[in-house]
Image: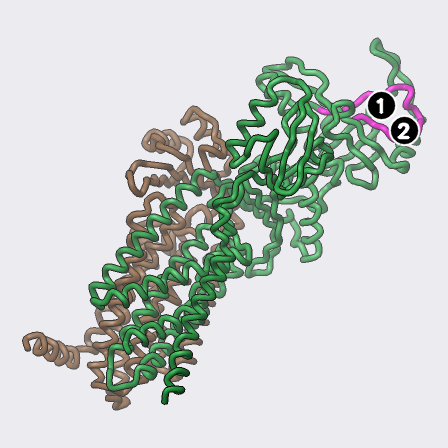
Amino acid sequence: MEQESFKSKFEKFHDKYYKLLLIIPLIILILSFFYISKVYSQTGDVIYKDVSLSGGTAITLNGDVDIVKLEKSLSQNFSGISLTTLTDISTRKPTAVIIQLRATVEELKPEIEKILGYKLDDKNSSVEFSGPSLGNDFYKQLLIALTLSFILMSIVIFVLFRTFVPSIAVIFSAFSDIVMPLALIDYFGIRISAAGIAAFLMLVGYSVDTDILLTTRVLKTKEGSLNHRIFGSFKTGMFMTTTALVAVLPAFLLLTSLPDSFRQIFIILSLGLLADILNTWLTNVSVIKWYCKVKNIQ
Amino acid sequence: MVLQGEKHTMKLGFKIWVLVFTLLFAFLAIAPWKIFNSGVLISSVTSNSTAFEQGLRPNQIIKFIDGEKVSNLADYTKIISSKFTSNQTLKTTIQTKDSEFILFSNKAPEITVSELPTTNIKTGLDLSGGARALVKAKNIELSSSQLSDLISITENRFNTYGIADVRVISVKDLSGKNYMEISIAGATPKDLQELVSKQGKFEAKIGNETVFIGGEKDITAVCRNDASCARIEICDTTEGGYYCKFSFSITLSQQAAENHANITKDLEINSTAQGNYLSKKIDLYLDDNLVDSLLIGEDLKGTVTTQISISGSGQGTTQVEAYDAAKESMKKLQTILLTGSLPFQLEIVKLDTISPNLGKEFLKNIILLALFVFVVISIILFAKYRNIKITLAVILTMFSEAFVTLGIAALIKWNLDAPSIAGIIAGMGTGVNDQIVILDESVSNLNLGIKERIKRALFIILGAFFTIFAAMLPLFWAGAGMLKGFALTTLIGVSVGILITRPAFAEIIKRIGE
């Protein structure tokens, strides 16, 4: 009984304020834009690029390496060094260190060998080098791919629903699902690799699942009241997002033994899914409810 | 009535049977029983070696050596290294899967071997270790036909050099630029870099006149792996270290030999304490750098000779280092003389060398992660549905999808790299989402028929499928295909889902519901 009254109270609240609720995601979106443009004005790019996109060398040293000494010695000759320690999943012991910076292998390798006091070979290290022009090419192409991916997704949504406002609501929600995580990634100062941008493409396709669920339940079925259908899809959608988060979040948090490029996929998907909760259940719900009220869909 | 009922049951079974057959097919494609195979795989055989002459070839599987069983790489190394300790010529009997070879030699068979693959799943360089380079021509944009020429010459150069396990492919990126991608299993980045970054334009000049150049037009044969005509001659100390000199003979074509005669016939003869030589030396250039200058004996003046000796040197801080360096340079020069120069000057735009140890660690962690995710998802599914059958159905479907994706990857010989594995995980994620939709649709609105409810679930699932398909498609081309694996496995995963596992899952749920 008590639960029922809470539900009906919440329904009344939502009926009254759903348009106002739109302001929350909008403010977050604007703040995100603000932060991204700040990064853009500082660096000339909307993200911090790692060496696979900016050009440079990444050297992975296997084993437990004195990271403090390495950083101190390297910083005398190089700037913009990024160091990451990988740790074993079960023992939590360091298994490798990744050094990334904008230099050629020939410049960096002898320095590291000098600091460590041994030669680097394929048993104790991995070396990845990307030329600056190639990195730039990759970056541009991945941005084009991201745009293309977004356009293709939008077309699919329009074909699926064939109505303007609900389709735009889904697309707008997907757009926010990309912008918000991007701002957070920038805020954390994470350097994005090519794989990271691929994760954003994935997000384009992945995050609209719940929006499609909501729109289908609301527009394509007639059982129950509008609020009932929204609430039903909310329950299903939240469970979907939770299971997805349960799969990707541990991948990021626990797998400190993975190369960054791989972990990035998971952190971006996690942030995207979190943003999707907001964008589906505040933005999209409010727009579609508004649309239904105007069109008199019960 | 009874007939109709039977028909109904058969129809119910069909989609599940499709899943069962697909799983069986994936099992056959992956061939996990290969884990029980024993032996070692020959991955390359040095050409012109004793092993080669006796008929050993790549891809043969060695089972026994001298009657001793060879189960793995460690066995092979143990037998061979304990056998060839002195310079004595020994008899070695190598038994492969279907034949026997007998070698007489004073050194280990000139073959490289590797562990037998345990399944048909191939892992990418970032997991198995190796070197990979993305190469483009300096200053010009290559057309597709130019690129395919370049690829065949490059392949030839690697094979001549003795690297058999090399894969050279062309990649095109979104903006239409052509690249050549070279991958070598097992890390040999130095060889890769040197064999590619040098165009390998070899010229032998007397004064300003070219006598002959590298390649089969002027050079018909190069002596290799034969100590009587290709060897390290002397080693000596030099400023701050050692140097070793190598020499090997080559056979010139008639045309090149006549060239030589024409140019030398007008040269004067200088007498020195060491003997009489022609007034000009023959200078050997590699990519416009002088590698060596050789004196020409007086007896060669104006004669049409097809046998020429080529020499050079290697340096090092110790004598062993210098010896190895000389051997290396000799091998490279021989390769270049045989294969000729590359048609373009190349530039390595990306070079990755991955330690095999890193990949092992990675795989171990991925498997642990997968188990963890399976367990956690099972728990929350059970918490929500309170039904062991449903939970099992979801987990089994999720597992089937990943397994079938792996099966398809094995079938098309796709090299699974780290992004590909991320794609499989992502595919499993969308799979679970879809199954939740089916479950929730089938338990909600019970006044509607189950068929109707599942049909609606399928609409949502199809929508999700097409959006992810559309979203991942551009990745096939962007970034010179480096992230193709991510797109491919995700797409295989979701396609398997929509075509096979999802319908089967819906059937299973229908049955559980009924």
Decide if residue B479 is in sight here.
Answer: no
Mark 1 — residue?
B280
At 47% from the left and 65% from the top, the residue drawn is B22
Q: Which mark is residue B305?
A: 2
Above/below status of B250 relative to B216: above
Q: Quadrant of residue B186?
A: top right
Magenta range is B293-312
At 78% from the left and 33% from the top, the residue drawn is B222
SS of the residue under disc 2: loop
Residue A64 is left or right of residue B236, and the answer is: left
For chain B, the rendered hue is green
> What is the three-letter code of the residue carrying label 1?
Lys
Q: Where residue A196 sits: x, y (%)?
A: 40, 54
* Mark earlier in primary sequence (2, 1): 1
Q: Quadrant of the C terminus of chain B?
A: bottom left
Chain for numbered disc 1 = B
> What is the three-letter code of the residue carrying label 2?
Thr
Above/below status of B453 relative to B423: below
SS of the residue under disc 1: loop
At 59% from the left and 31% from the top, the residue drawn is B67
Contact (CB < 8 A) between labels 2 and 1? no
**Badge 2 and badge 1 in a common chain:** yes
For chain A, the rendered hue is brown
